[in-house]
Image: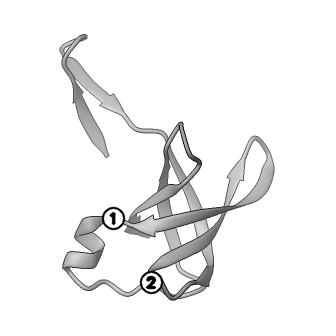
Amino acid sequence: MRKWDREKGQMKQKPNYRGEVQEVFADKKFQVKILINGAEEPVLCFAAGKLLKNKIKIIPGDRVAVYLEKIGGLGRIDYRL
């Protein structure tokens, strides 16, 4: 996903990772296994608003694109692949 950078006057790209959903929790959070620096790590993620609004189902085994926040370590699932 791209976002406008006001200071530089150009578009900037978010750091996205691709992973696979391992587990679905009851509070609409997901455990996703992503590849970071050559090692597979499990990350706790939540679904983005568009996924919830359009009632897109995410089940274990789905491949997803994840945006990681710099602070907190909680990821956001932007879309299913």
Q: Image quadrant for the C terminus? A: bottom left
Dot 2: what SS?
loop
* Residue under pointer 2: 58
* Residue under pointer 1: 48
Q: Nearer the viewer, mark 1 or mark 2?
A: 1
Residue 48 horizontal/vertical position (percent): 33, 64
Residue located 56% across and 45% down the image:
72
In terms of depth relative to the viewer, which is nearer, 30 or 58?
Answer: 30
Residue 71 horizontal/vertical position (percent): 54, 38
Residue located 32% across and 28% down the image:
12
The crowding category of the residue bearing disc 2, from other C-alpha atoms within 10 Å (few below 14, some 14 to 19, many at least 20), is many
Residue located 49% across and 43% down the image:
69
Q: Is residue 3 above or below residue 75?
A: above
Residue located 18% across and 14% down the image:
9
Residue 76 horizontal/vertical position (percent): 44, 58
Amino acid at the residue labelled 1: Ala
